[in-house]
Structure formats: C-alpha cells, structure tokens
Image (cartoon, rainbow, N blue to C red):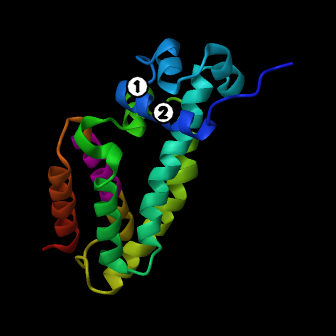
C-alpha cells in the first residue's frame, strides 16, 4: 500500500516557481527541485510527472497569479488611467519582483521563445483575456480624455505588455522596489502624455 503524501502540493508548486524563476528550466536539476520542494524523487514524479510537467504546471500557476494581480486592479472600482496605474503599481510591488529573485515567465520566454506550443498555450490562456480587458480599460481612458487622443487601444495594450516585460527584466537585473516603482511611474506618464 502506498504511503500518503506528506507535503502540500500548492506549497511545493510555489517553491518550484521560485527555483525555476531564479535558475530557469535548463539549469534546474531534478536534485535541485527535490531539495527545494523538500520531497523525494518518487513523490515528485508521482505527483507532478517529469520535470517538464512540473515546469508547465508551475508556469501555469505563476502566469495565472500574475494575470490575477493585474485583473484585480483593472476590473476593480477604478476606471481608466487610475485602473491602469493601480495594475502597473501592484505588478511592480510584487514580492517576487524584488531584488532579482527572478521571473519564471521571463525565463520561459528567454529559454523557449515562442517555439514551445505548451508554453505559448499557457501564455495565451491567461494573456488573451487580460489583453481584452486591458483594451477595454484603455478605450475607457481615451474616452475619458486621460490618454493622448492619437493613442489606439491596441497600441496602448502592446505598450503595457512591453512595460511589464521591462519591469520583469529590471527586477531580474536587481533593481530595487523603488526603482521598479519609478519605471512604472514614468510609463504611466508616457501613456497620459504628462
């Protein structure tokens, strides 16, 4: 009879996000995963399958959490530019953005680009609905006169994506929380033309 698992799967996934965020996929060995997750080899494989399956499950969790942080602000009571400010500020304030801890999404993009259909499916599953909401929020901000009149909602959404990627990259380079907030503030100013 198999022994019951004596670890928290969600906590183990969060730890997997952390190590993959710090080291990337290729540089993270199964031994490093077992040590970080505090589980044995058999438990790891029984619960998560192989290293790739664990990576994809952890990436899905991470990208979903990232999208949820943004959506919480974009769909909240604030409108237009205030909602956008709240989303960018909250994103830059994330604990995993502080002091170069790494970003699992950036590592996945850096290692695999757009060549891995499973990874791209994760990004699309969480990113496409987020982009649709962003586009609506940008349309609202333009209608409220909060953004430059010549700005198109699709272009503003692309800009927002680029800002988030820049914040992630700056965090990976070791920028402080204050520096990340400064980047977010400048980006918001660029959107409004101020």
32, 84: nearer the viewer: 32
Q: Position of residue 178 (x, y in %)?
A: 16, 53
Task: Say how many tags the image has.
Answer: 2
Where's the C terminus, which quadrant?
bottom left
127, 184: nearer the viewer: 184
Q: Residue at x 48, y 68 (%)?
A: 133
Badge 2 element: helix
Q: Residue at x 41, y 74 (%)?
A: 137
Q: Is residue 17 above or below residue 125?
A: above
Determine whether, in the image, residue 128 is placed left or right of residue 157: right
Badge 1 element: loop
Q: Is residue 131 above or below residue 22?
A: below
**Residue 157 makes an appearance in the image:** yes
Of callouts 2 and 1, which one flags the residue occurring earlier in the amino acid sequence?
2
- Quarter assignment of residue 145: bottom left
- Asked if labels 1 and 2 touch by Cβ distance under 8 angstroms, the answer is no
Asked if the stretch drawn in magenta spans residue 9, the answer is no
Asked if the stretch drawn in magenta spans residue 168, the answer is yes
171, 152: nearer the viewer: 171
Determine whether, in the image, residue 75 is placed left or right of residue 194: right
Q: Which residues are magenta?
A: 159-170
Q: Residue at x 62, y 36 (%)?
A: 9
């Amino acid at each position: 009879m198999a022994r019951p698992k004596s670890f928290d799967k969600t906590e183990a996934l969060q730890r997997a996000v952390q190590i993959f965020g710090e080291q990337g996929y290729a540089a993270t060995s199964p031994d490093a995963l077992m040590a970080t997750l505090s589980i044995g080899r058999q438990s790891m494989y029984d619960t998560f399958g192989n290293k790739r399956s664990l990576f994809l499950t952890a990436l899905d969790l991470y990208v979903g959490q990232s999208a949820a942080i943004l959506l919480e602000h974009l769909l909240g009571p604030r409108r237009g530019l205030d909602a956008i400010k709240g989303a960018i500020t909250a994103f830059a304030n994330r604990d995993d953005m502080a002091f170069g801890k790494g970003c699992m999404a950036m590592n996945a993009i850096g290692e695999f680009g757009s060549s891995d259909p499973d990874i791209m499916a994760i990004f699309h599953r969480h990113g496409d609905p987020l982009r649709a909401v962003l586009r609506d929020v940008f349309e609202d901000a333009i209608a409220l006169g909060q953004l430059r009149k010549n700005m198109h909602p699709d272009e503003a959404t692309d800009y927002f994506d680029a800002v988030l990627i820049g914040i992630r990259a700056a965090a990976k380079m070791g920028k402080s929380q204050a520096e990340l907030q400064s980047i977010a503030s400048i980006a918001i100013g660029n959107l409004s033309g101020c």
